[in-house]
Image (cartoon, rainbow, N blue to C red):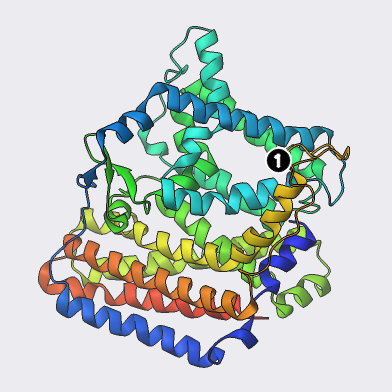
Amino acid sequence: MTAAPTLLAHGVGGRQDLPITLPQLVVAAALTLVVTFVALGLLWREPRLDRDAAGGRPMPGWLARLLDAPTFRWVLRGLGLLAAAWFCLGLLGGPDTADNPTAGALYVLLWVGLAPLSLLLGPIWRAVNPLRTVHLLAALAARRDPNRGLRELPASVGWWPASATLFGFVWLELVAPDRATLPVITAWLAGYAVVLLAGAVVFGAGWFDHADPFEAYSTVIGQLAPLGRAADGVLVWRNPLDGIAGLRPRPGLVAVVIVLLGSTMYDSLSNAPGWLRFSQENGLHPAVTGTAGLSVVIAAVAVAYLAATGAAARIGRADVADARGVPGEIAHSIVPIAVGYVVAHYYSLLILEGQRTVALLSDPLGTGANWFGTADWEPQTALVTPSGVATLQVTVIILGHLLGTLLAHDRALYLFPRARAVAGQLPLLALMVAYTVAGLLLLYAG
């Protein structure tokens, strides 16, 4: 990512802007989780969340008909294609300078902006994905069923391809040399398009569900949206906790959520003075150090998660089959934690650099044009005061862990015998406390 976005992401709100000292904050956050755990054990004795995502309040008929209408779906696909075409103007024809909106459009508007959009609207990227639309149009032109490929995709594949492509994107965003330059972005996007479109030819349109990193990202976060579908496909308004409780285990799900969480933790680490000194003085190429650091942090998050869920299964006395499935069953509880970190890390980036990128999108070719009338915008900073950002960061990180604790508790009541359910959650509580402490220390390491 360019130097400017990195500074904006971590330069607004620091430990000096916290309402209390960092040690006090860490202790208070840990105690909050412990108190919440005790309260849940006493007051939440039966499963309450809709694990099958079967309920919700149906939308008004006219709104449901509008959202499900083929015309509306084609409008969304058309908007996705238009946005992709405009993006390609800057990518392929714009100057390779700081005034090109390409890096900001990819790393800020798409990657960061997709999180709040998905929280509000659900898995929106699936509806506007330009590669999915290109494949659909090609299949229609060839008079082929877009859902049928040359062979069947094994069910065991799950989200493993998406976890790999997701790691590829976060590596591009956080580690790749010259990652804000047009040749690097072009090369990555070309590889992404080849992998997705070739896979869709072989396996059909379902390949996008299994392999597109942005679809997986949007789908996981979109489970927290108030807008969803009941088991019969009807559009409903729902409790977001019921929505995320309906994120059912599938191969690769744990890997996806761990990559999301681990990459945001590494992003904090990579801006810590100690890590910066180590990167500059160890004699290795920065990409080698960064790749190793990103991989180690994600692996550490994964080891902690698997150890905690394995211990929970043993203490909770789940049977053998259930014990193997516990990591996947609990994975949904990591999603609000990951979302909290995304908001904490990138809020100021989205507000400030997002405004700058929108302004630059008026002239993607650098010709002095002003197509949208936004070229003269000056970023407004009223929503990114240091104390306000620091308070928001603390709030969303603690709230994410509280929701994770609640979700894990409710799922444990399904998984474990009632007499062992609370005891079985002790390793999960330890995991939540560890993630909270690590997250806060890394976020304010500078």
Quadrant housing the C terminus = bottom right
- Whether residue 285 sits left or right of residue 415 in the image: it is right
How packed is label 1: few (under 14 Cα within 10 Å), some, or many (20 or more)? some
Please determine whether, in this image, residue 48 is positioned above or below residue 115. below
Q: Kindly indicate the quadrant of the structure image that contains residue 411.
A: bottom left
Residue corresponding to mark 1: 188
Q: In the image, is 378 to the left or to the right of 32? A: right
Q: Position of residue 188 (x, y in %)?
A: 70, 40
On the rendered structure, is 185 left or right of 217?
Answer: right
Label 1, secondary structure: give it: helix
Residue 177, position in %: x, y? 79, 54
Up-down: is 141 above or below 406?
above
Against 346, is 233 above or below?
A: above
The image position of residue 57, as x and y in percent, is 21, 46
Q: Where is residue 131 in the image (x, y as percent from the top left)?
A: 58, 29
Image vertical order of residue 16 relative to residue 439, above or below: below
In this view of the protein, can residue 199 be seen by the observer? no
Q: Is residue 384 visible?
A: yes
Residue drawn at x 53%, y 38% is 212
Q: Identify the residue at horizontal 72%, vertical 39% (top origin).
A: 372
The three-letter code of the residue at mark 1 reads Trp
